[in-house]
Image: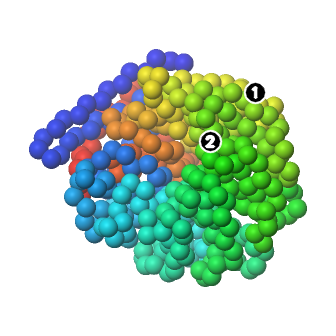
Amino acid sequence: MRPRTTLVALLVCGALAAVLAVGVTANGGALAQTWVSDTARQNEVNHHAVGVGPRGDVLVAPVAAVPNAEPIGPNSCSLVRLRPSDGATRWRWSVPAGECFTHALTQPAVADVDGDGGLEAAVGTTENAVVVLDAATGTEEWRVPLSTYGYGQPSVGNVTGDAGPDVVTSDIAGTLVVAHGNGTVAWRRDANMTVWARPRLADVDDDGASEVVLGGDGGVVVYEGDGAERWRTDVDATTLAVGPDGTVLAGSTGELTALDGATGERRWTADISGTPRIHDVGDADGDGRAEVYAGVAGNSVLAVDVDAGETEWRTSLGGGERQTAYAPVLDDVDGDGTQDVIAVTNDGTVAVLDGRTGEERAAYERSVPIWTFATSADLDGDGGAEVLVRYGDGRVVALDWTSSGGSALAVSPVATGAP
């Protein structure tokens, strides 16, 4: 690992501050800041990621305020559609001020929910509902009640076997709801556990149909498309992922566990310092075997072989032992046809890692905390994915890979404060 220097500063003037951000060059490339959204709040704890549509042309960000830390108004907790070219706001949909706090809105799922050829945004809210909006206008189309607020992103896919997609969501109390694309409820189940991770839709038993995989502090449970419980295990899953072969990966305090998707049988358990935060499973090193990528305490990222449970590489991104790396995601950032590992850390760093070795290829640093994973999408159609980072101050930063002759990017000031 090469040493990396950080240049950050916080300049306070009245109610506004300027945060200095810098892209750091490595191995012939760098992450360049292309825009910063005008969605700042007077807190640094926003922690629900950006949602993006399948073509990369619809970006929707949940933005939340904190009561008693800042004034709460009618638009303090909003779902905001951002223009991909410059991050400008296209529309805003808000929860009532009385329901506004840090968990007001989950990461939205952006998909064609009703099968009409247009896109919708599905989001869990502190109005104790999953709400579906027209992605073009921000107009509410329908909502389904939950028992409390959601935390993880809803999932969209065909679960029930009926025509068209379904919206699958859970709230933090473990209530699972499967709704058809028109808002009618297909079925509900109570998993009887606290659920932080989004439900995963996957064919875990290789029968040609998707099952619903739900994980929480009481275990992992798999439901068939009609709501029947296929299996349940007591392996805790604060974070959850599913491999291409149906292997279920569960991260909890001190452990990463692989479960057979068809039976729930434990395949292996790896001891991990802290809680492994996981999101993506893939083959970023091109060896023909799937890996799961985990962010852990000490600003470290791991690549773990899904079949054997062995750590293939471990990278430290610097910083103190109390800092945490959040769940890495996979995408082709530089457009070379291979997947890169995109990692973020709590101290504000975004890094692109080589999937084969874990070596840091480029980084971007901003002196604002990050509390969740990044989102990636090819916004400009150049074949390389841009990185969308949800910073704690409510802003979204878009980063693009650029070739470099070896000099660091210029420092750019970013104004903060309530819009």
Name the spot of residue 152 as percent of width and height, x first: 55, 56
Name the spot of residue 403 as percent of width and height, x first: 49, 35
Q: Which mark is residue 278?
A: 2
- Residue at (25, 31) in percent of width and height: 9
Question: Does the rendering let one see residue 23?
Answer: no
In the depicted structure, whether residue 1 falls above or below residue 163: above
- Residue at (54, 23) in percent of width and height: 316
Instruction: Quickly name the residue at label 1.
Output: 310
In the depicted structure, whether residue 1 falls above or below residue 190: above
In the depicted structure, whether residue 349 falls above or below residue 156: above
- Residue at (12, 41) in percent of width and height: 13
Relative depth, front residue between 355 and 234: 234
Q: Secondary structure at mark 1?
A: loop
Image marks 1 and 2: residues in contact by CB distance under 8 Å: no
Name the spot of residue 372 as percent of width and height, x first: 48, 45
First reached walking from the N terminus: tag 1 or tag 2: 2
**Crowdedness of circle 2 by 10 Å Cα count: few (<14), some, many (20+)?**
many
Relative depth, front residue between 404 and 271: 271
- Residue furthest to the front in view is 192
Name the spot of residue 297 as percent of width and height, x first: 53, 29
- Residue at (72, 30) in percent of width and height: 270
> What type is the residue that disc 2 sits on?
Ile
> What type is the residue that disc 1 sits on?
Glu
State the scheme by which the image is colored. Answer: rainbow
Q: Locate the C terminus by quadrant.
A: bottom left
Q: Secondary structure at mark 2?
A: strand
Q: Is residue 362 left or right of residue 82?
A: right
Q: Quadrant of residue 198?
A: bottom right
Q: Is residue 255 left or right of residue 56?
A: right
Between the C-alphas of marks 1 and 2, the distance is 15 Å
